[in-house]
Structures are given as C-alpha cells and as structure tokens.
Image: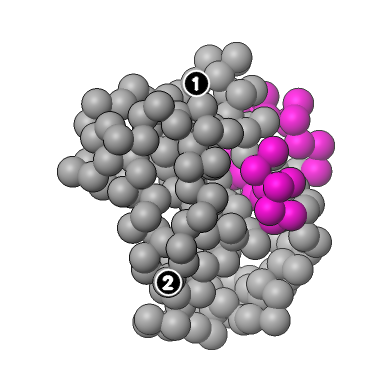
Amino acid sequence: MLSVKNIKFQYDAQNSFYIPDISLKAGEQLLILGRSGSGKTTILNILGGLLKPNAGEVKLGNTMINELSGAKLDKFRGKHIGIVFQKPHILAPLTVEENLRLANFFVGAKGERNLELLKELGIYEKRKSKVTTLSEGEAQRVSIARALANHPQLILADEPTASLDDENASIVVKLLQEQAQKFNAALIIVTHDQRVKDHISNHIIMGGLS
C-alpha cells in the first residue's frame, strides 16, 4: 500500500540523508527512530509530499506522490494522508469542531465521523471551545483528530510523545494505533523517544547525515 524506494535527498551539496526503503500494507505500523539531525522529520515530510526527493519514488496505493504538484498534491494529501505535527498546526481563531470541518472542506468531505472522532479522543466536550482555551494535551488531540478527519490511508506522526510523561505518552501512542486500526490505515511514527518501542516493535533507525 505504501512503497518507498531508492529515495535520495539533500539540503545542500555537502549533506545528504540516508533514507531506507519502506514497504507497508494497510493497517501496518512502523516506528522510525533517530537522534536530532538524523533525518526523521525530513523523511516524514517526503512521505507526506511536503518535500520532493532528489531521486526515488514514494507510492501510496496507485499514486506516485512525488510526481504530484500544486493543487493535485494538496488535494491528494488532504484526502489520503493525515499528518500529526510535533507542534499542533490548528487554527487558533476557530473552535475544535470548526478546525475539523475546515479539513473536510478542502477535500470536499462531509465529516460525518467528526463528532464520533472527538468522542473517541476524549475531547467531545471541547468541540465548541476555541483552540486558545485548550491545554497542551487537548490541543494535541485536536491535531490528531484533524489529521484523521478525512479517513486517511496513511497516518504520519512527528514526535507525538516528545513533551509527555510516561502515562500520557502511552495514551497518545495507543490512540494513534486505535485510530489507524479503525481506518485500516498505515501508521508511521518518527521520534527519538525510545519508549515508543514498547508499543511498536517494527522499527528502523535513521543513520544521520553523510
């Protein structure tokens, strides 16, 4: 379902990243571990179509993501890929529910599961609240909900446990796993947090710059 082959990427002539091949079926999970500067976020951005590789292919289903551009890429990403950023990328002037509806609007989805999703993530009672009134943990859950609002085939999470204690780190990883299972979506978590290995045994380690 997700196939990543022969990817090469470099920000400048001196520094290039080693990026391993990846093959995941629907419903499978992968943990990408690495220290700061190892290329974890770079590979997440390539998988999500936010960065174009210098060579190689990123294929989701029958679509070659790295060959898309402009509006076609934006629409494909919005419909098929859910990204949970390290810092919640949600719009402060809007309510929780409005943030999800905005994600639906961009791809022409109806958002029938939005309220159910907020219930599953434990923030249903915050649906009419402005984002500015939420705690850090609540904002992160809204970020997860928005990433899942359009029933993605691929869920990408960047350091979702970085600022959490053991209990809440475990809760967030399990929430991501449960939602991925509901959608039969592939889940990839990139992190330096070794605790996540307790939940996802399938992992690769980024080697860093060469």
Graded by Cα atoms within 10 Å as few (under 14), some (14 to 19) or many (20 or more), the crowding at tag 1 reads some
Could one spot residue 91 in this view of the protein?
yes
Position of 35 with respect to 2 (left or right) is left
Q: Which residue does the numbered mark 1 point to in the structure image? A: 164
- State the SS at label 1: loop
- How far is the residue under mark 1 from the one under mark 2? 34 Å
Q: Which of 6 and 156 is in front in this view?
A: 156
Residue 169 vs 110, above or below: the answer is above
Do the residues under discs 1 and 2 have CB atoms within 8 angstroms?
no
Position of 97 with respect to 82 (left or right) is left
Residue 18 on image: x %, y %: 63, 60
Q: Which residue does the numbered mark 2 point to in the structure image? A: 108
Residue 140 on image: x %, y %: 43, 34
Q: Nearer the viewer, residue 33 or 110?
A: 110
Range shown magenta: 178-202
Residue that protrudes farthest toward the left in the picture: 93
- State the SS at label 2: loop
Under mark 1, the amino acid is Leu
> Quarter-wise, where is residue 13 in the image?
bottom left
Quarter of the picture containing the N terminus is bottom right
